[in-house]
Image: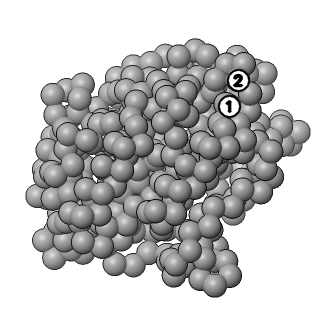
Amino acid sequence: MDVPGTQAVWVKTFGCSHNISDSEYMAGQLQDYGYRRESAGCNPADLWLINSCTVKGPSQAGMSSLIAVGRAGGKRLLVAGCVPQGDKRLPELQGVSVLGVTQIDRVVEAVEETLRGNTVRLLAKKELPRLDLPKVRRNRHIEIVPISTGCLGACTYCKTKHARGHLGSYDPAALVERVRQAAADPWVREIWISSEDTGAYGRDIGCSLPELLDALIAVLPPDGRTMLRVGMTNPPYVLEHLEALSAALRHPCVFSYLHVPVQSGSDAVLDSMKREYTVAEFRRVVDTLLAGVPGMELATDIITAFPGESPGDHVRTLELLRQYRFPHTHISQFYPRSVGARGERGGCVGGRVGVGGRCVGRVWVWVCGVRGWRRGGGRRGGERGVEGRGREGCVWGGVCG
């Protein structure tokens, strides 16, 4: 019989940088306890730790397929992340161990019990996991620091709020110390601050994102060898801080890059999504940042085929993209979710699938005049994936379906 703490564990992560950070913390604890991290593939591992994502249908489907493969191969399975936290009654989760998003500091216990043949279900919500837990970075040059969990929104298409809950911000002093330690590591060249909505940081504890950024910048090496990247922010909670945010993004130790999802160029669709801002307010965010930050690079998200979207709504979205020519445009097909942030079925309940639904097999957004996509480089956003280039220098922002 294997000695506890000596078996091999394979970690598979779906989803955002916050999920990646959670997996790094879990891997660090397991390695400290003596478990071997299987990096050569899933087959040799004694246990599969699957950190799941519920934000889109394909991510959850990928988790489900992996569980089925693991069951067929007789693997011990532990499923963590947003899916079991948000929907523990899913049929594919029955009979496997599950670990909630605030329970990652109990991963060693969950792995031990699962390897003994027991099924554990650790889903109770509790205080935020400590930031000083052992950690194994997926990329040793990038430290991901979660600054909060949950959000203040109630988007009708999103299940993440159901899993991560209401906004919970980390104490600024703990975040400053974590960034100080990461910046002192000679391997670390980028520090990414991450959450479900960085712009909302601190509203539950009497603080703000610009105040946090000032404190973090103060502990970065002044020679710029370690750069800070600000994670995704929704428009509503940065409107009052645009000048201060611009000042932080102008700092030579901060990437002049920000991900600000718009989702639609139509106010009617945004209202149906319960996004809590208008297209004009989104434009104000974009215009202020582009004017106030030299070399500013912006990313945005689009959801196509949202229920009730009309041809006119779709055209307004395309016009917005043509105007700003975002270097990064992430396009997603609308996927009905079983539970939205308000306990509804995702999207407009009972609504007609929008105009994009007739072409979801291939939705191309052409942004002409951009000279292609880059990976890494300069102060413009750190590590980035290479997308595609069309004819005559046109760049497509994505494809769904």
Looking at the picture, does residue 14 appear above or below residue 149? below
Q: Residue at x 64, y 56 (%)?
A: 38
Q: Residues within 10 Å of mark 2 (few under 14, many from 20)?
A: few
Q: Quadrant of residue 114?
A: top right
Q: Residue at x 55, y 34 (%)?
A: 269
Looking at the picture, does residue 295 appear above or below residue 50? below
Circle count: 2
State whether residue 149 appears in this view.
Answer: yes
Looking at the picture, does residue 135 appear above or below residue 205? below
**Nearer to the camera, 192 or 245:** 245
Residue kind at label 2, given as amino acid type: Gly
Please name the residue that numbered disc 1 is placed on.
Answer: 307
Q: Quadrant of residue 292?
A: bottom left
Q: Residue at x 83, y 37 (%)?
A: 68
Pick whichever of labels 1 and 2 is earlier in the sequence: 1
Picture coordinates of residue 281, whole percent (x, y): 34, 42
Where disc 2 sits, the SS reads loop
Please name the residue that numbered disc 2 is placed on.
Answer: 351
Picture coordinates of residue 308, whole percent (x, y): 67, 31
Q: Residues within 10 Å of mark 1 (few under 14, many from 20)?
A: many
